[in-house]
Image (tube, grey):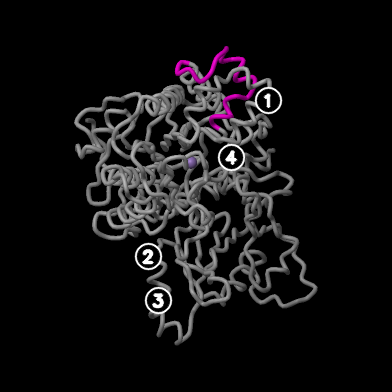
């Protein structure tokens, strides 16, 4: 312990300085900047520099004294590999590339086929780029100079890919000329590589690779990096929050445009198309965070509607509800927003019953959210509010507590209340080794993508929903423990009506939360917007939604009160 106490301060001094400098650059929004021109958001590249500094600091602070999961001297190098350009099946058609999220969080470099390293303990960042030949230059444009690339991304160094091996050798053993097969190394410098499982997809983040990396078997550390970045990604910096405010604003305004344009007789895919047009033309968003769900009529009860087998191809009919779950991304940061509304601009009484049930759940959760609160409790709160409304509406009978104990909530809301969001719509960090609470096996709770207690700086979606899914209703009716709460005739009136979901992206603050999504939520707001009234409205009729009203001033988000 004494050794560590003597060692730590000098190790961390440099990286603290880097962190403070990056924070300053972010605040002043200094060059280099990522922007798609016009009034699209200006992302300071220092946002990623700050991420790197936080990462290095957390690695250095967590060094084990025994050096098992880290180097006791703090020496080493982090190596990450960016995504690779793919082609469509056997063809040479290249779909638009989108950077791998861990790499983008760390370096902010959107290009394919690159690797990058961070030297420890200094925190110095080096990008390795392929140098292409004449053919590439003819078809894809001139190679940028290394200095131009360095300046564009705000990195410390950029080197050609052929220098990678030499660089790693220098970092790990101080010797760039080691061709000895009996390679041995006595220093404790570590090669930190990414390796871990995504708890939403079950897929693995794989360690960076280059020919020659094999010789560092002894120094290879695949334990420390993944959990360190995951944890850092869960907690957003101010710069990340401002960027997420922008992408939420763009995505919210596009939802408003779609609501305004929606007419009986249109096709679902036309709503998808309008949304993509608005977010790209007015927001510079080339990518969606996920495939658009444009579900009308009975289709909202298909939770992942919009896939190739159900390609948003229904024609909107008078009396349909629409459930539109769409979100764009900018600089690889995601939004995830759902609006539900009647396509003809008028709610029926039954539609109003379900809409208000979900809206009440949304308000109850947003009102209750604050640091320290359990996400499982929030899921239960939403279930309780929805079941209470269904009981009032004559669909259920009995005690709400008994219904919850009988897992009835999951019949009407079979998905989790919400999830962490950041570079991915379903962001990393939901379940990790350090979270004591494992995934529940109870219906509904087993679909929660996190069981964390909330902390200021986290961003989560809050997305209660109420659906009429035939197979779940039939199962409940066949289950005596659940059937006794169901009023079959009244319930049958709702079969085929789809469902309602409202989804906002919410930042946890010290006091409670801020809603980054600025969509119409009150019934009067939805109807006003569909009648072409302006948005944002003159007055906030639902302050309980804690929406942050913002406008875009030349690529900077300005907050204001209505
Ligand atoms: Mn979502």
Please name which of the two marks, 3 or 1, marks the residue nearer to the observer: 1
- Element type where label 4 sits in the image: loop
Magenta-tinted stretch: 392-413
Q: CA distance from mark 2 to mark 1?
A: 61 Å
- Element type where label 3 sits in the image: loop
Instruction: Write down the residue under mark 4.
Output: 430
Q: CA distance from mark 3 to mark 4?
A: 40 Å
- Give residue 99's position: percent from left, percent from top: 49, 61
Any magenta on residue 194?
Answer: no
Please name which of the two marks, 2 or 1, marks the residue nearer to the observer: 1
Q: Is residue 224 above or below residue 501?
A: below
- Give residue 160's position: percent from left, percent from top: 51, 75
Q: CA distance from mark 4 to mark 2?
A: 33 Å
Any magenta on residue 407?
Answer: yes
Mark 1 or mark 4: name the one nearer the start of the chain.
Answer: 4
Residue 484 lies in what quarter of the image? Answer: top right
- Give residue 422's position: percent from left, percent from top: 47, 45
Q: Are marks 1 and 4 in contact (CB under 8 Å)?
A: no
Of residue 131 and residue 340, the one placed in the foreground of this image is 340
Of residue 196 and residue 495, the one placed in the foreground of this image is 495
Q: CA distance from mark 3 to mark 2?
A: 11 Å
Q: Which quadrant holds the N terminus? A: top right
Please name which of the two marks, 4 or 2, marks the residue nearer to the observer: 4
- Element type where label 2 sits in the image: helix
Please name which of the two marks, 3 or 4, marks the residue nearer to the observer: 4
Q: Are marks 3 and 4 in contact (CB under 8 Å)?
A: no
Q: Which mark is residue 479?
A: 1
Instruction: Write down the residue under mark 3.
Output: 145
Instruction: Write down the residue under mark 2.
Output: 152
Mark 3 or mark 1: name the one nearer the start of the chain.
Answer: 3
Mark 3 or mark 2: name the one nearer the start of the chain.
Answer: 3
- Give residue 499's position: percent from left, percent from top: 46, 34
């Amino acid at each position: 312990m004494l050794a560590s106490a003597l060692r730590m301060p000098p190790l961390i001094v440099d990286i603290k300085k880097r962190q403070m400098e990056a924070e300053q650059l972010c605040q002043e929004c200094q060059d280099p900047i990522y922007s798609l021109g016009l009034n699209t958001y200006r992302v300071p590249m220092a946002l990623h520099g700050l991420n790197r500094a936080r990462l290095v600091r957390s690695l250095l602070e967590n060094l084990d004294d025994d050096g098992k999961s880290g180097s006791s001297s703090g020496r080493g190098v982090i190596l990450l590999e960016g995504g690779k350009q793919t082609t469509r099946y056997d063809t040479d058609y290249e779909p638009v590339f989108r950077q791998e999220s861990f790499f983008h969080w760390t370096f902010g470099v959107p290009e394919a086929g690159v690797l990058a390293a961070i030297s420890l303990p200094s925190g110095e960042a080096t990008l390795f780029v392929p140098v292409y030949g004449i053919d590439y230059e003819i078809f894809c444009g001139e190679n940028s100079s290394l200095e131009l690339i360095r300046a564009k991304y705000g990195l410390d160094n950029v080197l050609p890919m052929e220098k990678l091996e030499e660089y790693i050798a220098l970092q790990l053993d101080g010797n760039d000329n080691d061709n000895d097969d009996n390679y041995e190394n006595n220093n404790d410098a570590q090669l930190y590589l990414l390796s871990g499982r995504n708890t939403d997809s079950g897929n693995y983040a794989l360690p960076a690779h280059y020919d020659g990396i094999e010789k560092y078997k002894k120094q290879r550390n695949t334990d420390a990096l993944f959990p360190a970045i995951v944890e850092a990604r869960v907690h957003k910096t101010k710069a990340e929050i401002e960027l997420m405010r922008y992408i939420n604003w763009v995505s919210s305004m596009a939802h408003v445009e779609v609501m305004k344009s929606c007419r009986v007789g249109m096709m679902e895919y036309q709503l998808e198309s309008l949304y993509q047009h608005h977010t790209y033309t007015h927001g510079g968003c080339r990518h969606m965070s996920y495939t658009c769900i444009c579900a009308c009529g009975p289709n909202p009860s298909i939770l992942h509607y919009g896939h190739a087998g159900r390609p948003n191809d229904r024609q909107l009919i008078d009396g349909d509800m629409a459930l539109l779950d769409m979100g764009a991304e900018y600089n690889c940061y995601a939004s995830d927003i759902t609006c539900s509304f009647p396509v003809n601009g008028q709610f029926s009484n039954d539609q109003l019953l379900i809409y208000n049930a979900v809206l009440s759940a949304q308000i109850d959760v947003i009102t209750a959210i604050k640091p320290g609160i359990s996400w499982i409790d929030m899921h239960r709160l939403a279930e309780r509010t929805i079941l209470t409304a269904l009981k009032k509406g004559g669909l259920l009978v009995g005690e709400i507590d008994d219904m919850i104990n009988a897992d009835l909530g999951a019949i009407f809301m079979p998905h989790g209340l919400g999830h962490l969001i950041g570079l991915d719509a379903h962001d990393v960090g939901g379940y990790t080794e350090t979270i004591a609470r494992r995934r529940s096996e109870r219906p509904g709770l087993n679909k929660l993508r996190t069981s964390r207690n909330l902390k200021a700086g986290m961003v989560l979606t809050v997305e209660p929903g109420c659906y009429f899914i035939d197979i779940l209703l039939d199962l409940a009716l066949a289950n005596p423990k659940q059937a006794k709460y169901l009023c079959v005739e009244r319930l049958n009136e709702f079969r085929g009506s789809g469902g309602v979901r409202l989804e906002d992206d919410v930042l946890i603050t010290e006091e409670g939360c801020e809603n980054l999504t600025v969509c119409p939520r009150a019934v009067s707001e939805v109807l006003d917007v569909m009648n072409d009234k302006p948005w944002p409205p003159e007055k906030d009729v639902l302050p309980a939604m804690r929406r942050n009203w913002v406008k875009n001033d030349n690529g900077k988000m300005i907050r204001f009160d209505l």
